[in-house]
């Protein structure tokens, strides 16, 4: 990892939609469709942000039939994992991000 990699990771976390997506993936493994329904944004927007997060190794995907499930990286020694731990702690204190998680739980219940 070099300074450029760290800058790109931190910059990616500074974008509101990506931060909201990372917050949703904190406790869950979900599909693009679930993220779209939860955040009320289009599939193309979600896919674009997930693609960026995947390239930076912030999220990983798992394919199951026609569905792709996304979750946060779990490589505990990685800088990306350490950033997600920090974000988890900070997101607990932001009511709009906690509201997103409540909506996510409702979407998952209805799926």
Image: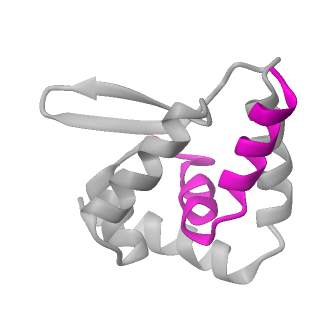
- Residue drawn at (35%, 64%) of the image: 45
Indicate yes or no whether the magenta region holds residue 26: yes
Q: Is residue 83 left or right of residue 64?
A: right
Whether residue 109 is visible here, answered yes or no, is no
Q: Quadrant of the N terminus?
A: top right
Q: How is the image coloured?
A: one colour
Indicate yes or no whether the magenta region holds residue 45: no
Q: Position of residue 90 (x, y in %)?
A: 85, 62
- Residue 56: image quadrant is top right
Q: Position of residue 20 (x, y in %)?
A: 58, 65
- Residue drawn at (82%, 17%) of the image: 77
Q: Position of residue 110 (x, y in %)?
A: 26, 66
- Tally of marks: 0
Q: Residue furthest left?
A: 66
Q: Is residue 50 above or below residue 24?
A: above
Asked whether 25 or 27 is in front, the reply is 25
Q: Is residue 93 above or below residue 34?
A: below
- Residue 13: image quadrant is bottom right
Q: Which residues are magenta?
A: 1-29
- Residue drawn at (26%, 57%) of the image: 33
Asked whether 11 or 62 is in front, the reply is 11
- Residue drawn at (35%, 78%) of the image: 40
Q: Quadrant of the C terminus?
A: bottom left
Name the magenta segment's main secondary structure.
Answer: helix
Whether residue 68 is visible here, answered yes or no, is yes
Asked whether 46 or 101 is in front, the reply is 46
Q: Is residue 81 left or right of residue 72?
A: right
Q: Is residue 82 above or below residue 96?
A: above
Q: Is residue 25 above or below residue 69?
A: below
């Amino acid at each position: 990892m070099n300074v450029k990699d760290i800058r790109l990771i931190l910059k990616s976390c500074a974008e509101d939609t990506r931060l909201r997506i990372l917050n949703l993936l904190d406790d869950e493994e979900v599909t693009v469709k679930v993220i779209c329904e939860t955040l009320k944004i289009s599939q193309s927007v979600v896919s674009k942000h997930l693609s960026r997060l995947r390239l930076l190794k912030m999220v990983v995907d798992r394919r199951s039939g026609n569905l792709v499930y996304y979750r946060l990286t779990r490589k505990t020694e990685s800088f990306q994992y350490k950033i997600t731990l920090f974000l988890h702690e900070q997101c607990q204190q932001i009511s709009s991000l906690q509201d997103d998680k409540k909506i996510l739980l409702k979407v998952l219940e209805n799926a």
